[in-house]
Amino acid sequence: MHPEPADDLRTASFRDLDTTTLYAILKLRADVFVVEQDCVYGDIDGRDTEPGTRHLWFERDGEVRAYLRILDDDGVERIGRVVTAPQARGAGLAGRLMDHALTVIGHRPSVLDAQAHLAKFYTRYGYQQTGPEYIEDGIPHIPMRREIEA
């Protein structure tokens, strides 16, 4: 019996993404957010290319298995587009990405808009609800914030 291959953690700015990786990231986001969640919205919003944006993902054998991005919103870091491929769910990749994202963010405050059913997941990382639940693209969301750590 062979051990399962490891998932490799990657981090890059937009300009450091090769086209094959960028395509795989955008395909994963479309497959999950648009197709699986049946949510028609403009995923390619122009923010991926901003100089302060960092892209974090796990890949195995060229396949992007989990992904998130960190945006710079005027001194507050914004985590978004957190996604795991269906075949990679249950392996803890989203949690490992969040751990790494918080290392990248460091002691700066950060925010995210959690799908409501995932709010408890984000509270494990120090995020607290900052406003009422709202509907975005037909999906309930909760605004959350993590303050600066001392």
Image (tube, grey):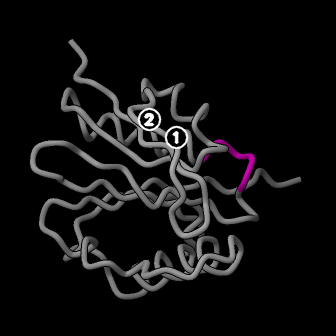
Most foreground residue, 80 or 38: 38
Q: Magenta stretch: dominant SS?
A: loop
In the picture, residue 55 is in which quadrant? bottom left
Q: Is residue 91 magenta?
A: yes
* Horizontal side of residue 72 vs 2, given as left or right: left
For residue 96, the mark is 1
User: Element under label 1?
Assistant: helix
Q: Is residue 137 magenta?
A: no
Q: Which amino acid, mark 1?
A: Arg
In the picture, residue 66 is in which quadrant? bottom right
User: In the image, is residue 107 above or below residue 89?
Assistant: above
Please name the residue shown 67% across and 81% down the image: 35
Q: How far from the left and from the top, in percent, is residue 135? A: 54, 58
Mark 1: few/some/many CA within 10 Å (<14, 14-19, 20+)? some
Q: How far from the left and from the top, in percent, is residue 38? A: 68, 77
**Magenta extent:** 89-93
Q: Which residue is disc 2 drawn over?
A: 99
Q: How far from the left and from the top, in percent, is residue 131? A: 41, 36
Most foreground residue, 69 or 13: 69
Task: Count the numbered circles shown.
Answer: 2
User: In the image, is residue 5 above or below residue 123?
Assistant: below
Please name the residue shown 60% across and 64% down the image: 65
* Horizontal side of residue 23 vs 36, given as left or right: left
Please name the residue shown 58% across and 55% down the image: 7
Q: How far from the left and from the top, in percent, is residue 12? A: 28, 63
